[in-house]
Image (cartoon, rainbow, N blue to C red):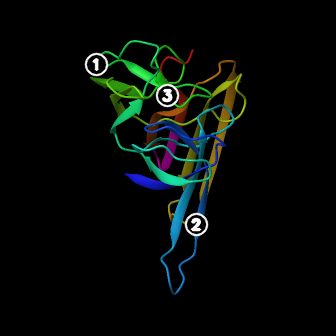
Amino acid sequence: MSVVIQNDSGMIIPARSIVVAVSVETTARSANREASTITHVDQYGCGKPGNVMVTGNTAIGIGSRGLGFFDPFIYVCIDPAISDPAPGEEWGPTDGSWVLTRNNSTRGFFAQGHSQNGGTPKRSLFLRTYVRAPATNCSSSSSSSSSASSGSSGSSSHVSGSSSSAGNCGCVTVVTGVSCSGGSLSVTYGQARGCC
């Protein structure tokens, strides 16, 4: 799946780079054009809590538009200074970088064992899972849970939640559990594997 993105990073975004959504702009339908949605993106990093996507096969100039992809199998730029990923190895985005790297605390991309090293930039094929940039404080990660219930008529609802924090930069929040009991839905969030 692709979306139209606009480069708000202040830098040229290289092809097949990791970006994070920072805002969404919609324009209303008019007599002469359809409604449109543009996702504004920036370089991956702490304090930018949006969803992570991968850009297309061309660079995107400052303030220009291009495409961002949420595809599950996708080529992504990798750190050219390190060896290619082994099949099944988990990689992730790095704060302040356009490329994926290994041995970092943010995960979510599983190598499929095919790299294209003949050109620039160096890239590899990955299976992508849900990845989101760290929310606010670079020096903290969090885990939380929330629950929602609805009355027997379904007309009223109640939502509650709790959270806790511990120091560790670069962790991402993922859903770690979902349960339903007696009309209540409970969702538990935690850190991605390899964060702590």
The foreground one among 186 and 89 is 89
Between discs 3 and 2, the one toward the N terminus: 2
The foreground one among 55 and 151 is 55
Q: Amino acid at mark 2?
A: Thr
Between discs 2 and 1, the one toward the N terminus: 2
What secondary structure predominates along the stretch shown in magenta? strand
Q: Amino acid at mark 3?
A: Val
Q: Amino acid at mark 1?
A: Pro
How many residues crowd mark 1 within 10 Å: few (<14), some (14–19), many (20+)? Answer: few
Would you identify the image quadrant in which residue 120 lies? top left
In the picture, measured across the screen, residue 71 lies left or right of residue 192, that is left
How many residues crowd mark 2 within 10 Å: few (<14), some (14–19), many (20+)? Answer: few
Q: Which residue is mark 3?
A: 99
- Examine the rendered structure and indicate whether residue 168 appears above or below residue 99: above
Residue sticking out furthest to the front:
119
Q: Which residue is mark 2?
A: 26
Locate residue 17, reporting x and y percent: 48, 36
Q: Which residue is mark 1?
A: 87
Give how far apart the Cα atoms at labels 3 and 1 are: 18 Å
Q: Residue at x 31, y 19 (%)?
A: 88
Q: Residue at x 64, y 48 (%)?
A: 8
* Magenta-colored span: 181-187
